[in-house]
Image (spheres, grey):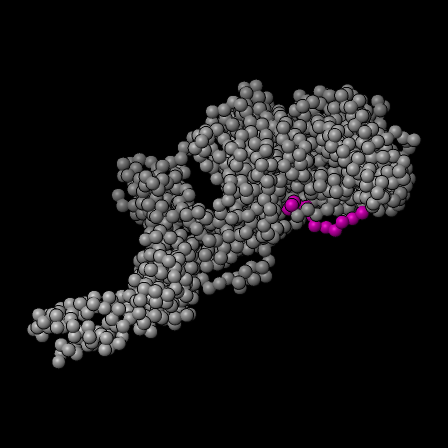
Amino acid sequence: MEYEVVIGLEVHAELSTKTKIYCGCSTEFGGDPNTHCCPVCTGMPGALPVLNEKVVEYAVRAGLATNCEIARESKQDRKNYYYPDTPRAYQISQYDLPLCAHGHVEIAVGNTEKEVGITRIHIEDDAGKLVHDGYTGGTLVDFNRAGVPLIEIVSEPDMRSAEEAVAYVEKLKGILEYIGVSDCKMQEGSLRADVNLSLRPVGSEKFGTRTETKNLNSFRAIARAIEFEIARQKEILDAGGIVYQETRRWDDETGEGYATRNKEEAHDYRYFPEPDLMPIRLSEEYIQDIKNSLPELPESRKNRYVNEIGLPEYDADIITSSKYLSDFFEAATDICKNAKAVSNWIMTDIIRIAKEKGIEYNELPFSAENLSRLIMLIDKGIISSAIAKKVFNEMAESGENPEIIVKEKGLIQISDEGAIKEVVDKIIAANPQSVADYKAGKDRALGFLVGQCMKEMKGKGNPQILNKLILEYLNN
Amino acid sequence: MITREDIKHIADLSMLNLSEDEIVKYTENMKEIVSFANTINEVDTKNATESAFALDTYNVFRKDEVKESFNREILLSNAPSTNGEAFSLPGMMN
Amino acid sequence: MKEICEMTAHEIRDMYEKKEITVPEVVKAYIEKIESEDENIKAYITVCKEEAMEKAEKMQARYESNEKLPPLAGVPIAIKDNLCTKGLKTTCASKMLENFIAPYDATVIKKIEEAGAIIIGKTNMDEFAMGGSTENSAFFKTHNPVNLERVPGGSSGGSAAAVAGNMAPIALGSDTGGSIREPASFCGIVGLKPTYGLVSRYGLVAFASSLDQVGPMTRDVRDTAELLNVIAGHDELDSTSANISKKDYTASLVNDVKGIRIGVPKEYFGEGISASVKVAINRAIEKYKDLGAIVEECSLPTTKYALPTYYIIACAEASSNLGRFDGIRYGYRSKNYDTLQDIYKNSRSEGFGEEVKRRIILGTYVLSSGYYDAYYKKAQKVRTVVKQGFDEAFEKYDIILTPTVPTVAFKLGERVNDPLEMYMTDLLTVSINIAGVPAISIPCGKDEEGMPIGMQLIGKHFDEETILRAAHTYEQNKEV
């Protein structure tokens, strides 16, 4: 049977506040176990939470940037459950009055664009970390992450493929980075997604039973987990079986998903209003002030790149998908005044380097300034494009200023006609057969002669001048 | 009407093990207490909103300023078991 | 002259100033009194003899250097054992926390220490403040100093017995549904439950977060005002702490109630109120009239629904608040386990006492799927109605006057087998917590067997002044 895939995502993003959501402990990543902790975030008896004002502000920013309505009245609720990483045996979250609701973002897959609805965005606290103790075989509990603020962004079940799901998460990641509320470092777990997925026969209105695969922390894992789950559910349904509503995990190493043991999945979280925290009331002015302070969002930047700078839509889309990349693009363009060249370098070599090294764009070892220096070296004719590739690779390793690389390695282009003519004369004298071939109409011989000259000049000859001189000789 | 099965389920949610005697006793107690609790249905609350608090206060916030964290040794000092850096549990628990 | 151990805190303080007595003498007298009397009364779980004596010596040196000293300088104080005291055991009278040494001080503890008070011990209570007789302590039962066969009330029974038994001049208690006022009434002392939010809850081991308040338990109204001066005030560590300006409550201690309007709700004199209590309260009412107050009968029609509402809300919050006692970060861990579930279930089942488990079960039940709307949500609405009832009454009256408890202190063991009857003890005190208003219990006579009777004066939100004034005036004018 043909099935339609129905996907909804719950994306958790850690907010980049300095302190935790309910206490003054630092949110800094790393640190020895339990050194960013206090009685509040370890759930000591008698300790009480106080809400970090930045958390509200950041959540509202996220809501406004995703076209949500912002609640004028909101509150926090307790979600009760027992787990060793949850120090009070309840998470403080939001149940029926989230800060933001009814938003949407636009995504594009291939040539089709669509809107993904955002059901709600609410604030909550992160849990601690459980680590296997290799020494005793036991479990160690580290509460450094406990109490780090999160927003949970819940989408509508609007996505129909892994590509759409990935595009949606990429879109959210871009937005959150742009508005500066989360650094979205997926490898540190500061952005992660739970995938709700079901299948239904094409044309059916009714949703199938969904499963939830939790805690996916890379685009690759999201895509693979979705493909795996689609295949799994399809196989069950094709065999006439029943898909059970269950919580699943994804093992990125084996490439397989598995159901968590849900023996007592009689989950009853007993949500109720958190009596240690007062309700939140947001005024029109507060919301308007945040609205006014929002930076230009990717959508608007993209339009500007296409309409004002003339970048191809695809390139503009890629560049604006990352705030870092887009800021990098703007900074480099600002200096070298050659937006097309900057865009080309980004679309080819920068994306390639990041992929090869497996790094995020903000981990690139060189600055926008150095890329613009490289572009200006080409534009001024000081180095050739061929040499520029070498310089770029060098710069991508060391982060060094390309002007210095060029100087130290003696890569400056030779444009002196006299010097080039000497080489041309020498090569032509040594290759009479190629000259004859050219004259007999074999154009390929020209390339060979240019190549031989370039080789003689160790690649530093100005290609335009070289070409001109050889042609002058051959055509005379 | 509260049954012993209800009590067993509630005890599970509350992470309590109840002995047979306790199940019997708490079932009896709860029948009485819950029927007493049911008397609140006599109050007309058509026009009443829910109050989580006695006072009408809102927007109690803290500035995003880092405070020194706690001495780890003291935080761990009441734990039944630790490895000196973290709270510990025997076995890999799921 | 009075014995040292019979003096109030302000009398002790005056004598220090006049150099008629030294701090070590006072602290020593109390320690000796505890050593001789407490084996019968059993008010204290922990006595800090060495630490208290050491602090007494230091404080004495400060008196001798004639520096200006804070209001409770050198005054011994007893602390209910659910207030976190850094470096001292804080047990909540539970096996769960039998060896728990708090890693930090509650805000009120910081405040009383800054005010110079010297903690002489931590007092017994109903386990996690759940009870009205202190019989639910996991360690031992406390006896009423007035009559050792009777309960001292609860849950702050140890603090009440310490003050009434001359083993501390003043004490701190906590009150969720009457836990300061009921034992104050039973032991014949003064106890105040402040307006919700007036005193910080930071470091008070929570029973029911939206109802709990810390308050003074003392021998006279002046000490209550003095102690309230010290502990009241905004705390940025407690989101429910009210951000209002500081007051001097001793300024309200004027001997005058002329023109004060007092409402006496008829619902507080119905079924279950003993004859001797009614007689004593009526006598107090007459006294107020004589002193020029305007006393009228009034009505608080939802009174009878406050008790079930209270138990639903308090137990719901407690079931969540007590989740953290799971045998992982602190507290009792069962020796008996194979799985994580075992650690949780066995530690909690062995660590909590009967009444605590009963309330966790009730609280979990009213929050659980399918019952939330009928119980918890409904109770939150009734809470609004109860509040409105008080608001309306306070449009007409400055104070509402009622008995504190329907009866005098009952005998140990008398009610332990009937939870619902035990809950009835809270009948007249719980609606005050639900509405968040302040109330003071002051002694107003004794029954024929000599057991103390308490009168409850209820005030408007943050108007502790008026009830303190009326309480003080009554205290100054009552027949001894």
Q: Which of A44 and A464 is in front in this view?
A: A464
Quadrant that contains the C terminus of chain C: top right
The image shows residue C57 at horizontal and vertical percentages of 79, 35
Q: Nearer the viewer, residue A464 or C322?
A: A464
The image shows residue A10 at horizontal and vertical percentages of 43, 47
In the picture as drawn, the residue positioned furthest to the right comes out as C1
Q: Would residue A398 appear left or right of C211 to someone viewing this image?
A: left
- Evaluate whether residue A329 shows in this view: no
Give the main secondary structure of the magenta stretch. loop
The image shows residue A90 at horizontal and vertical percentages of 54, 38
Q: Nearer the viewer, residue C123 or C355?
A: C123
Q: Residue at x 71, y 32 (%)?
A: C80
Determine which quarter of the picture holds residue C327.
top right
Q: Which residue is drawn at 41% across and 55% down?
A: A363
- Evaluate whether residue A399 shows in this view: yes
Q: Would residue A212 appear left or right of A74 to someone viewing this image?
A: left
Range shown magenta: C237-248
Q: Which residue is drawn at 28% across and 69% down?
A: A384
Q: Would residue C415 appear left or right of A114 to someone viewing this image?
A: right
Quadrant that contains the N terminus of chain C: top right
Determine which quarter of the picture holds residue A247.
top left
The image shows residue C208 at horizontal and vertical percentages of 64, 37
